[in-house]
Amino acid sequence: MQGKVEICGVNTSKLKVLKNEETMELLRRTKQGDKAAREELIAGNLRLVLSVIQKFLSRGENVDDLFQVGCVGLIKAIDNFDITQPVRFSTYGVPMIIGEIRRYLRDNSAIRVSRSMRDTAYRVLQAKDKLIAQTQKEPTVEQIAKELGIPREEVIFAMDAIVDPVSLYEPIYSDGGDTICVMDQVSDTRNTDDSWIEQIALKEAMKQLGEREKHILSLRFYEGKTQMEVSSEVGISQAQVSRLEKNAINTIKKSL
């Protein structure tokens, strides 16, 4: 936002800031049908929209689009605000603006989620807010499922479906040197390129063994049986099992 003065043709450096008393008076007049007061109220809270959209600038979305969507959330907040409640307008308006922007980002995400899944997710969010208001604490998945009368799994799937995806290359820490990205924290140390190549080489080496040797190695190292147990199952002496096992391992080592 640094150096950005105009958004949607609005000079952000000259946006008016209303005091709480002015806001409440304009809200009262707006509820009485005063359209001029409504316009003044919208204009006087554009800086609120501007402060909210800065939280979403890292998404790579067009700033003008985010600002317009945020204004829709602001207008909804103005139209739905209850002036009889002892709540500051900004306290009510910010979540409305954030919710509108998040809904826009979800609906325009590259990852498509079915309408029915999104509808379930919105119901879950509403139920969650209701339960928080009633109990003053975060509800469990089971409580939300009971409130909506749906299976626990549906709640989990619905919430997972609307979680914003995170790039593997998104930086999470930097201390003047190399930046640590999400990929560095979630990388699989077992299924690396090196281990993948080793697995291929091992499979090729195993192809050089006879069926009896393969069977003995399988019993020894996959099923964890002793040489005595293997000799009993295969029908040969323990000494033969030991010799065949040793020869098989040496053959694999030479191939690798």
Image (cartoon, grey):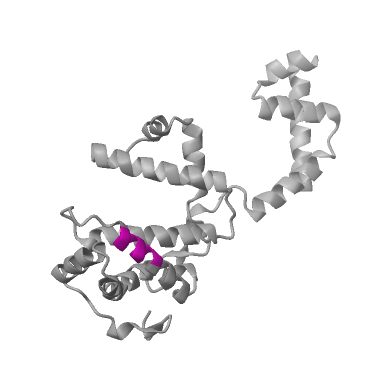
Residue 73 makes an appearance in the image: yes
The answer to whether residue 3 is magenta is: no
Check the image and name the residue furthest to the left: 21
Bounds of the magenta segment? 72-79
- For this view, does 55 lie left or right of residue 202? left
Residue 4 makes an appearance in the image: no
Q: Is residue 198 above or below residue 48?
A: above
Q: Position of residue 113 (x, y in %)?
A: 57, 50
Q: Position of residue 56 (x, y in %)?
A: 41, 67
- For this view, does 220 lie left or right of residue 122? right
> What is the quadrant of the N terminus in the image?
bottom left
Nearer-the-camera pick, 67 or 143: 67
Q: Position of residue 218 (x, y in %)?
A: 73, 28
Which residue shows up at 38% across the image and 32% down it? 147
Which residue shows up at 31% across the image and 71% down it? 51
Quadrant in which residue 145 is drawn: top left
Which residue shows up at 25% across the image and 62% down it? 31
Q: Position of residue 129 (x, y in %)?
A: 32, 44
